[in-house]
Amino acid sequence: LAILVSQISLSSTQNVNVVIQGATSISETDDNFVCATLDWWPTEKCNYNQCPWGKAGLLNLDLKKKGLINAIKAFNPLRIKVGGSLQDQVVYGVGRVKNRPNFMKNEDSLFGFFQGCLPKERWDELNKIFNQTGVKVTFGLNALLGRNRSQIEKGLWVGDWKSQNARDFMKYTISKGYKVDSYEFGNQLSGAGMGASVEAEQYGKDIVVLKNLVKELHPDPKTQPKVLGPSGYYDEKWFNSFLEVSGHDVVDGVTHHIYNLGPGDDPNMITKIQDPSYLNQVAQTYKALHGGAKDLSPTFADGFWYLDQLGMASTYNHKVFCRQTLIGGNYALLNTTTSIPNPDYYGALLWHRLMGSTVLAVTQESNPNLRVYAHCAKKKPGISIIFINLSKDSSFNVTLSNYERQSRNSRSTDVAKPEFRGSKDREEYHLAALAGNIQGQIVLLNDVPMDPTETFDIPTMEPKLVNASTPISIAAHSIVYVTIRDFQAPACA
Ligand SMILES: *[C@@H]1O[C@H](CO)[C@@H](O)[C@H](O)[C@H]1NC(C)=O
Ligand SMILES: *[C@@H]1O[C@H](CO)[C@@H](O)[C@H](O)[C@H]1NC(C)=O
Ligand SMILES: *[C@@H]1O[C@H](CO)[C@@H](O)[C@H](O)[C@H]1NC(C)=O
Ligand SMILES: *[C@@H]1O[C@H](CO)[C@@H](O)[C@H](O)[C@H]1NC(C)=O
Ligand SMILES: *[C@@H]1O[C@H](CO)[C@@H](O)[C@H](O)[C@H]1NC(C)=O
Ligand SMILES: *[C@@H]1O[C@H](CO)[C@@H](O)[C@H](O)[C@H]1NC(C)=O
């Protein structure tokens, strides 16, 4: 009996108080914070004894797939970054550049493939789907064009960037009326680079050339694409010199990669992403490694990592978070062959619909297994909160408090208010794994499996309305979004 009793008490519900500082915002994201990438990899790209790209690369993806179109449309709009490792070997089939064979296998070339070409016909097709689904496009430009490998230092590329092909590409894009939200300069060439690197001073000089080109061809500041870079792992010294050399008003957004899941074949990954101290360590360094979690990414469990990353990145004032990838590779939001959404897709879509751009501070000291992030609601009024319960054997009853800034004798202090008691029903979205199998690929929303219908429509994702007099209940191993319309947060007014 004693053993039985202690087991019951182990899996009992814990009460947790979450304090939200509704008075001030701690950071702001872009309105389209959730972003996903499309990459160049050819079918022949293989690693970990798999060839995970299939026909999901930019040059061979079937753009007429209903599933793909509907998955993008549901975001209305989705931000997509076009780019990846091979982008610095892609030329554009415009101006004097003739179409040529794509990505021939070649051991001596960067990443094992020799040069690719984006024919203008393919750029037309891509823009057709971007236009039809309302995508905001970030286009990753080839930043190695015109440079040569250094004779002295392995991996280093030297010489000035040649901008002519980019100029012809932009001219063509403008002539067709295609919209590009931003141009990103190069991929993974900063710091030590991945395969290839460019010195910070050289890169800084070249991004000024790119900025001037963008300004010259898009004189209207309202429609002028932004210039982003360097899109590599964060290296403080390199980033600082790069920004010093490029100077003010050149780089509109600094972009960096993170790959904190380590190489994709780590058998302990399932344990790591449920460990709050591992997730926190990532927050502190927020630094990148490389790889992909091949068996994990299409599963429910990946949401423990991915949605937590969205939370941390927004807290640390990042404007956009691009998931590698939308489709293709080992860690896509959509299944590469069927284009059916993986669980993370639904988590991302809810984030996009519910979490506004203003980020609020949240504290919760009862249990490290409960991760919490709060933003102003995307659609006013109120706030939206995401709870991620990493624990597999305890659930939580959550109550909320609001902090209020009070001015007294010309000093302002944050004063904790008693428990918040709403009067309007809460809107709740409970995500859980089918049959509790977090390594499975089926996610339940409020107990209903998210299956795209036969017509590949994304299911409607309606909240459950819950009486405000009950605490928010977060089941074990679940992810819950809650929107509270009558939570008075001055920062959201
Ligand atoms: C799609 O293209 C049409 C015609 O060029 C344009 O008017 C419209 O604004 C575009 N839509 C989007 C979402 O880019
Ligand atoms: C790169 O190599 C090509 C061919 O050898 C040469 O014509 C060109 O001048 C070199 N460019 C630089 C920047 O060194
Ligand atoms: C994609 O879906 C197919 C068919 O359901 C499945 O066999 C395959 O494992 C899925 N791929 C991934 C990477 O999950
Ligand atoms: C998380 O799940 C565990 C396991 O059921 C549960 O005991 C705990 O109370 C949950 N946490 C929250 C905040 O609901
Ligand atoms: C919520 O529950 C309380 C207490 O049970 C009840 O008095 C109240 O009428 C309920 N509110 C709504 C909107 O159903
Ligand atoms: C948690 O909330 C439920 C539903 O309101 C309630 O029945 C239960 O007693 C609560 N548990 C604790 C430990 O307070």
Image (cartoon, rainbow, N blue to C red):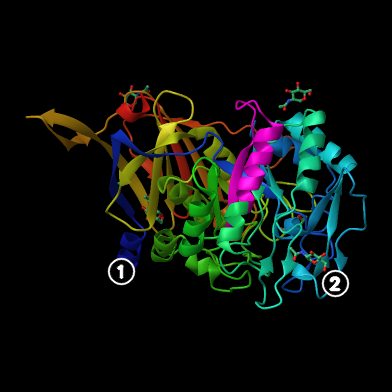
Q: How many labels were placed on the picture?
A: 2
| Residue pointed to by mark 2 | 106
Residue 279 numbered tag: none
Q: Position of residue 225 (x, y in %)?
A: 64, 35
Outermost residue on the left side: it is 409
| Image quarter hosting the C terminus | top left
Residue 450 visible here: no
Q: In screen coordinates, is 405 left or right of 423?
A: left
**Closer-to-camera residue (419/178):** 178
- Residue 72 among those drawn in magenta: no
Residue at (70%, 39%) from the top-left corner?
71
- Give the magenta-colored segment's residue range: 206-232
Q: Position of residue 215 (x, y in %)?
A: 65, 35
**Closer-to-camera residue (327/35):** 35
Residue at (82%, 67%) from the top-left corner?
113
Residue 1 numbered tag: 1
Question: How packed is label 1: few (under 14 Cα within 10 Å), some, or many (20 or more)?
Answer: few
What secondary structure is marked by label 1? loop
- Residue 231 among those drawn in magenta: yes
- CA separation in Å, label 1 and label 2: 68 Å
Q: Position of residue 377 (x, y in %)?
A: 44, 30
Ligand 2's image quarter is bottom right
Residue at (85%, 37%) from the top-left corner?
124
Disc 2, ligand 2: is the CB inside 8 Å?
A: no
Looking at marks 1 and 2 on the same chain, the residue that comes earlier in the sequence is marked by 1
**Residue type marked 2:** Asn
Between circles 1 and 2, the one closer to the viewer is 2
Residue 100 visible here: yes
Residue at (81%, 75%) from the top-left corner?
108
**Closer-to-camera residue (459/297):** 297
